[in-house]
Image (cartoon, grey):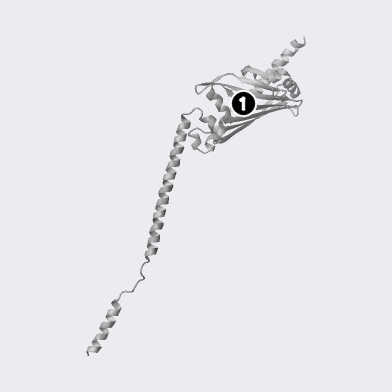
């Protein structure tokens, strides 16, 4: 009887015995701990490096804001971004009754016609340039801009032929104070004005096609922190509005000066 009673007890104890688990590796635990510490150290190092770079950039920008020579240094170093602006305007000007396109073309080949195209009445001075025949240095009258006096100086080439006339802007610069003239290193401009005339059809006319392109170095805040489109889009609209206003005036001026030229020709012949 005693031997039979001991068997269930042995079975009961076997059921309650916990399942053994493999012991943890001390070396593996130490390895994972070392890897965790290394990652934390790298993150702290990266954060410190990012903070030092940001602080250095902030100090450099602060120095540029108070330094009048910063624009010139940026241009020489070539570190700035360039915004490219452009605009185009085409205008067809009907000719008055009795006026042919060939007669207008003859006027534009005359020195009086060249002066009309250059709009000498709005210039401070006009002189032949050394870039070849038909080139002129045109100095515009001084204008006030942001507290400075600025005199734009253009070098233009006028090339009239029997069928058309082309006016090109070869260069543009500003004269004034030293800080104003430093801006000449930060931009470039190109302009082309192509004039043609026609007697075909029922309505003789002259056609004016003007292209204007400007490249600007973007280095001042807040524009240097924005995408170039933030400068180019409003700049394009501004230039387009300028051409939309000036090109029709140019057509009217050519016809007005042509009429005066025709009226003076009999007096010159006499």
- Residue 76 drawn above or below residue 144: below
Which of the two residues, 85 or 199, is positioned nearer the viewer here? 85
Which of the two residues, 102 or 136, is positioned nearer the viewer here? 136
Quadrant in which residue 120 is drawn? top right
Dot 1: element: strand
Q: Is residue 141 rendered to the left or right of residue 116? A: left
Task: Count neighbours of disc 1 (C-alpha within 10 A) and say few if under 14, some if 14 to 19, many if 20 or more.
Answer: some
Q: Residue furthest front?
A: 27
Quadrant in which residue 12 is drawn? bottom left
Q: Quadrant of the C terminus?
A: top right
Q: Residue at x 43, y 41 (%)?
A: 52
Q: Is residue 18 rendered to the left or right of residue 210? A: left
Which of the two residues, 258 or 43, is positioned nearer the viewer here? 43
- Whole-percent x and y of residue 119? 65, 20
- Whole-percent x and y of residue 222? 48, 34
- Residue 205 drawn above or below residue 40: above
Q: Residue furthest top?
A: 270
- Whole-percent x and y of residue 112? 71, 17
Q: Quadrant of the N terminus?
A: bottom left
Quadrant in which residue 125 is drawn? top right
According to the image, label 1 marks what residue? 172
Which of the two residues, 2 or 197, is positioned nearer the viewer here? 2
- Residue 235 drawn above or below residue 134: below
Q: Residue furthest left?
A: 2
């Amino acid at each position: 009887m005693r031997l039979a009673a001991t068997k269930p007890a042995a079975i009961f104890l076997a059921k309650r015995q916990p399942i053994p688990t493999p012991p943890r590796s001390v070396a593996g635990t130490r390895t994972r701990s070392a890897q965790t510490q290394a990652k934390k150290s790298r993150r702290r190092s990266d954060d410190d490096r990012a903070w030092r770079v940001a602080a250095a950039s902030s100090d450099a920008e602060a120095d540029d804001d108070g330094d009048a020579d910063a624009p010139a240094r940026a241009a020489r170093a070539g570190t700035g971004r360039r915004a490219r602006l452009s605009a185009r305007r085409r205008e067809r000007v009907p000719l008055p009754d009795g006026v042919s396109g060939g007669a207008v073309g003859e006027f534009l080949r005359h020195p009086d016609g060249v002066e009309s195209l250059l709009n000498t009445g709005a210039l401070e001075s006009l002189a032949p340039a050394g870039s070849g025949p038909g080139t002129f240095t045109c100095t515009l009258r001084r204008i006030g801009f942001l507290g400075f006096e600025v005199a734009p100086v253009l070098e233009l080439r006028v090339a009239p032929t029997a069928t058309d006339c082309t006016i090109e802007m070869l260069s543009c610069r500003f004269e004034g104070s030293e800080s104003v003239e430093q801006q000449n290193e930060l931009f470039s401009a190109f302009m082309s004005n192509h004039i043609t005339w026609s007697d075909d059809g029922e309505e003789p006319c002259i056609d004016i096609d003007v292209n204007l392109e400007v490249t600007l170095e973007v280095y001042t805040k807040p524009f240097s922190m924005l995408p170039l489109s933030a400068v180019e889009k409003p700049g394009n609209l501004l230039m387009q509005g300028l051409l939309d206003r000036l090109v029709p005036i140019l057509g009217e001026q050519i016809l007005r000066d042509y009429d005066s030229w025709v009226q003076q020709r009999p007096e010159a012949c006499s």
